[in-house]
Amino acid sequence: MKEAAAPEQRVQLDESPINNTQTGERYSPRMGLGEFTMNVLNGISVAVVVALVPQALLGELFKALLPVFPQGKEIIGMVSVASSMLPIAIGLLVAMQFKMTHIQTATVAISAVMGSGVVKGINSDEFLQLKGTGLVINTGLTAAFAVIMILLIGDRLKSYTILVLPPTVIVIAGGLGKFVTYPAVLVFTKWLGNLVVGAADLQPIVMGLILGIAFGVMMASPISTVGIATAIFLSGIASGVANVGCCAVAFTMMWAGWKVNGPGGSLVHVVGSAKVQVANMMRRPVALLPAIVACGVSGIVAGIFRVQGTPISAGFGISGLVGPLAALNADGWGWSVRNILVVALVYAVVPCVSAFFAVKLFDKKLGVTNENMYALKFH
């Protein structure tokens, strides 16, 4: 007797960008420019933190420990590789913002790498080299090109999606990013970065005031300070004063909400990030006034002492001692007692004290702010 034939099993690929089969969510390609841009920027912001935090926190620390812990060189190498994975992270997280499927997400990620410039020697028969973090702005642009292509293609490819979509998008979107926009964006970002760095070198006090306030305000906003700093290659004194501004806003938020948030909730701003206050600042922008004063004062002091930093350290606050470690490891500095005291004064004492008095000024004297404006609600 013949056995009954098993029913044929077919796997149907549903790769429509507006119908994610993994989540059941639908995403309409008919969206405004503002919504599209925010999705891309949000993906970049998260990716920058995920890929660069390991190097920022551990890289500088283990550099300082190398004389007593030479094995730390391996960890430095690992976190350096992690930072070079930034373009992949940007592509993945941008695609996730648009609720794309696995095939589409991987396609956007690979396309982003093509336009990032992080891979050197593509035309070489001998080797490929990962260098740096890539050009963040152009990586985001390339990811956006890939997303637009996928949204336009939609589900027209049906069962041929897995064969046709990846090579088409990678070559066209990746090529557009690599050969068309990359050269222009590279020139612009280097020019802008050199302009800011040069101005900070010539006028450290004035630029300390400007950059301290600018990065302090951005630290309490949805904008990624790390993303901005790495995008324009912010380094030297410009990086140092920007980082001090981020430290000042963290201490300001700590003092401003001490009564309503308690010690634990208040210290989150310092050991974590002042971005936990984004919702409060968006609702009541006036609550930023004490931070602006503290950031300005701290930035001026940082400019006087000409503290320095790196593109990665510029956008961090006091968390993980990223900025202070970068300053001590900068050229012309070092771990002398005097330098340690200067760094402690600039990155901790001045921001903390100026923040305390700024909060008292706007709360008790002027009556512009109150502690309830800074209340955190963790659910």
Image (cartoon, rainbow, N blue to C red):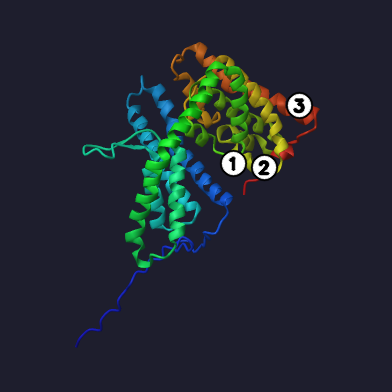
Q: Quadrant of residue 278?
A: top right
State the residue at coordinates (58%, 49%). 34
Measured in 3D between alpha carbons, the distance from the residue under mark 3 to the one under mark 2, in whole angstroms, is 22 Å
Which of marks 2 and 3 precedes in the sequence? 2
Name the residue rendered at 57%, 39% in the picture. Answer: 223
Look at discs 3 and 2 and give the one toward the viewer: 2
Q: Quadrant of residue 119?
A: top left
The residue indicated by pointer 3 is: 361
Labels 3 & 1 near each other (Cβ < 8 A)? no
Using the numbered discs, state the Cα–Cα distance from disc 2 to disc 1 in whole angstroms: 9 Å
Q: Give amino acid for label 2.
A: Met
Front tag of 3 and 1:
1
Q: In the displayed structure, would residue 290 be above or below residue 337? A: below
Indicate which disc, 3 or 1, sits on the residue closer to the N terminus. 1
To which residue does mark 2 refer? Answer: 282
Q: Which mark is residue 222?
A: 1
Q: Secondary structure at mark 2?
A: helix
* Number of residues whose C-alpha sits closer than 10 Å to that of mark 2, classed few (under 14), some (14–19) or many (20 or more): some
Comparing 340 with 127, the one in front is 127
Furthest toward the bottom, the residue is 1
Residue 237 percent across, percent down from the top left: 52, 20
CB under 8 Å between callouts 2 and 1? yes
Name the disc covering residue 249, or none: none
Q: Mark 3: which secondary structure?
A: helix
Q: Residue at x 65, y 33 (%)?
A: 253
